[in-house]
Image (spheres, helix red, strand yellow):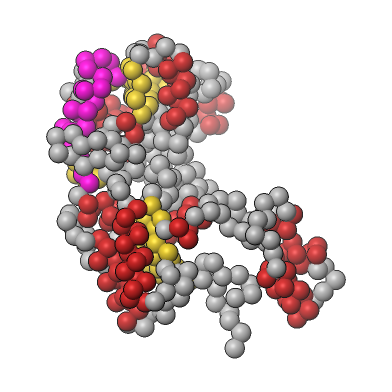
Amino acid sequence: MERVIGTVTRGLRCPIINEGDSIEAIVVDSVMKAIDQGEFVPQDKDIVAVTESIVARAQGNYATTAQIATDIQDKFGDETVGVIFPILSRNRFATLLRGISMGAKKVVIMFSYPSDEVGNHLVELDHLDEKGINPWTDVLDEKTFRDHFGYQKHTFTGVDYIDYYKEVAEEAGAECEVIFANNAKAILNYTKHVLACDIHTRVRTKRILKAEGAETVHTLDDILNHSIDGSGFNGEYGLLGSNKSTEDRVKLFPHNAQPVVDRIQQTLSEKTGKQIEVMVYGDGAFKDPAGKIWELADPVVSPAFTTGLDGTPNEVKLKYLADNNFSDLKGDELKNAISNYIRNKQDDLVGHMEAQGTTPRRLTDLIGSLADLTSGSGDKGTPIVYIQGYFDNYTV
């Protein structure tokens, strides 16, 4: 019988992960349990995706606000700290802000507007147009912003992040001033000592500030990039990718995760006889068209993956072939012609018209997004995702 099923994604349940657990053993046991129960038959080039959260939990990669404060104090001393371009998130940034503020006498929080880097809006762009405000040139203080736009709560969370962040900073013991600007240089009128909290534009922000005479510039990947008083840490990403654990503790992005995926792959190969690829994933890379939120608040989708997941797709567009190369064919003749074309396609289709419209992204970004949508961020309880048929094509 002709095959009619393509890619299949399954969320796998596993035990609640605690610090010190063997994440490799738990992942392998969960996969093998699903196989033994007849859920699927493993094949070469299957993919096991493991959420970064359970890897970091097993590693015990945590830090307290006091430890964050110590690192801030070490790097900035008693200077006023410009905290610029924070994202609007109770889960992602509020606890970090508490630690930052505990380590500083005064913070100047500079919000980007009308939205943060990942699409959370303080105000609608149309409202800026109505008020004649140019977000690329105009720097607003808190009173001016409020006079124009009042008090607006986030659509989904119901939080006024301006008041909320100011309250967090002041409760942590810091004096707090709030401004709004999209040009990093604007902060230098308030302080020459800056913590850039943007995620994907942080390198450019640091370069601009240093070129303009900032005396101290750090980004979030500079904070907790080594252990402070026995804390967890991430040597590459620091506080980037961290999540709230408690009011005074955060879970960091997993560190040294490559050996984890390599060991899981090796063990699964021994148990199944198949070459199964493995990756750790965080936020997917996609945008919500209604809420306008770009999901990727992690520095990367996947901090660790096995070699079979490196690279980008090398695919042709079926509808292009049907409408152009083989427009005179129908039925089995068309199917056979397209199948033959796929079997003989070049190893690198970059620049070829037959590949136009295929998704030009890294495999790990695409697969990580698929896994993130499958596992969700709530109570599904499936932090392991098993994917089959992802690398299949029309001929397989």
Which quadrant, please, contains the C terminus? bottom right
- The location of residue 190, given as percent across then percent down, is 36, 12
Decide: is 165 above or below 394: above
**Does any portion of residue 313 appear in the rendered image?**
yes
Q: Does 18 sit above or below residue 333?
A: above
Q: Give the image quarter of residue 202.
A: top left
Which of the 4 image quadrants contains residue 89? top left
Residue under the image location 53 percent in, 18 percent down:
137
Q: Is residue 350 left or right of residue 210?
A: right
Report the front residue among 244 and 261.
261
- At 27% from the left and 56% from the top, the residue drawn is 54
Which residue is outermost to the bottom?
A: 1
Q: Where residue 150 sits in the image (x, y, percent)?
A: 40, 26
Residue 280, percent from left and from top:
37, 55
Residue 350 image position (x, y, % from top left): 67, 51
Q: Is residue 138 above or below residue 395?
A: above
Please say whether residue 262 is one of the residues in the magenta stretch: no
Which one is in front, 245 or 224? 224
In the displayed structure image, the side of residue 384 where residue 172 appears, left or right: left
- The segment highlighted magenta reads 61-81
- Does the rendering let one see residue 168? no
Residue at 47% from the left image edge and 69% from the top image edge: 45
Considering only vertical position in the picture, is 264 above or below 288?
below
Assess whether residue 76 is covered by the magenta stretch.
yes
Q: Give the residue displayed 38% in from the left and 35% down from the top.
A: 87
